[in-house]
Each structure stands twice: as C-alpha cells, then as structure tokens.
Amino acid sequence: MATVCPVCKVEVEEKKARATSTYNEQTYFFCCKACKKKFDEEPEKHAKKDKQSV
C-alpha cells in the first residue's frame, strides 16, 4: 500500500518505508530518516499539513 511522506510529500510504499513514527495513534511512514527526524521535532506541524493534503 502506498502513502505519502508527511514531510516532503513523496510517495512511500509502507512495506519499504525507511522509518515510521506514531503520533496521536496514527502511524506515519517516511521516505528517509531525515524526514522522520523533522517530523519527530515538530509532529503537530507535519501532521496538520498531512491532514490538509488528504
């Protein structure tokens, strides 16, 4: 299943995601560890951005 990295907005296959984080009981999948780090530093910023784009 494909999803979108909440930081850089590229498509990510969940099974091939380089990293994941859980925030507000939702799992986010990332294209790289750098995006996970950015998300973990400001999850509210990126989680909101992700919800707006859906």
Image (cartoon, rainbow, N blue to C red):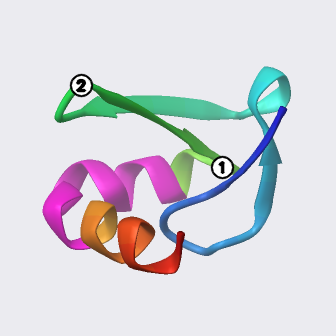
Q: Is residue 3 magenta?
A: no
Q: Is residue 41 above or below residue 2?
A: below
Determine crowd level at label 1: few under 14, some 14-19, many 20+ residues with C-alpha closer than 10 A: some
Determine crowd level at label 2: few under 14, some 14-19, many 20+ residues with C-alpha closer than 10 A: few
Sooner in the amino-acid sequence: mark 2 or mark 1: 2
Q: What segment is highlighted magenta in the picture?
A: 35-45
Q: Judge from the rendering whether residue 28 lies leftward or rightward of residue 10; answer left or right.
A: left
Q: Quadrant of residue 42?
A: bottom left
Label of residue 25 in the image:
2
Q: Quadrant of the N terminus?
A: top right
- Image location of residue 19, percent across then percent down: 58, 32
- Image location of residue 25, percent across then percent down: 24, 25
Q: Are marks 2 and 1 in contact (CB under 8 Å)?
A: no
Q: Is residue 13 above or below residue 54?
A: above
What type of secondary structure mainly makes up the magenta span?
helix
Q: Residue at x 49, y 69 (%)?
A: 7
Query: Closer to the camera: disc 2 or disc 1?
Result: 2
Q: How many marks?
A: 2
Q: Residue at x 56, y 45 (%)?
A: 33
Amino acid found under the numbered disc labelled 2: Glu
Q: Judge from the rendering whether residue 32 lies leftward or rightward of residue 27; answer left or right.
A: right
Mark 2–mark 1 Cα distance, whole angstroms, equals 21 Å
**Residue on which the image places disc 1:** 32
Q: The residue tagged with tag 2: helix, strand or loop?
A: loop
